[in-house]
Image (spheres, rainbow, N blue to C red):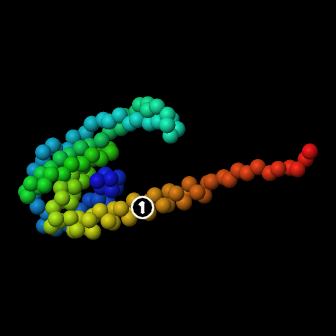
Amino acid sequence: MGVLAQSAEAELARLWSGLSGLPGWDHLRRPEVGLVMVRGRMGGDGGPFNLGEMTVTRCSVRLENGAVGHAWVAGRSAAHAEMAAVADALMQDPAWRDVVGQKLVAPLHRALAAAQEQAGRKAAATRVDFFTMVRGED
């Protein structure tokens, strides 16, 4: 679910169009936009505090075979939430698990990993190493 939620909607839609013969589904909860409170901590063990709110879209679907899928995605995209919810339900169906894993989740995971690696390289290029020299004076 993390890969589907974090991926760019355009990339998910492009890969989604390559899936054929998808079963039908009904909405248990149509895509709806709301707010969630984002919490943070100062340091590793500090007390939690409310950082602010962010917009999310959630959706729940049931496939024809009864499998249920849920999704929460950042932002206001109903299409993104619906595709992620359907993919979640498909991953629970043994007939679809490998197809969705190979044609949808794996490419999205590689794209996310590449973007994270590129961001890491960009941050590493600005890294400054500080050191202290002992002057040897008495």
Question: Furthest residue to the right?
Answer: 138
Q: Position of residue 125 (x, y in %)?
A: 60, 58
In this rendering, the answer to whether 36 lies above or below 61 is: above
Q: Is residue 36 something that shows in the picture?
A: yes
Residue at position x 29%, y 53% from top?
A: 1
Residue at position x 70%, y 50% from top?
A: 130
Q: Position of residue 31 (x, y in %)?
A: 20, 44
Q: Is residue 133 left or right of residue 12?
A: right
Can you say which quadrant of the picture contains the C terminus?
top right
Q: Mark 1 — residue? A: 113
Q: Is residue 45 left or right of residue 32?
A: right
Q: Nearer the viewer, residue 103 or 92?
A: 92
Residue at position x 50%, y 40% from top?
A: 44
Q: Is residue 9 something that shows in the picture?
A: no
Q: Nearer the viewer, residue 75 or 69?
A: 69
Q: Position of residue 8 (x, y in %)?
A: 34, 55
Residue at position x 12%, y 47% from top?
A: 27
| Kind of residue at disc 1 | Ala
Q: Quadrant of residue 34?
A: top left
In this rendering, the answer to whether 2 lies above or below 52 is: below
Q: Is residue 8 left or right of residue 135?
A: left
Q: Residues within 10 Å of mark 1 (few under 14, many from 20)?
A: few
Q: Secondary structure at mark 1?
A: helix
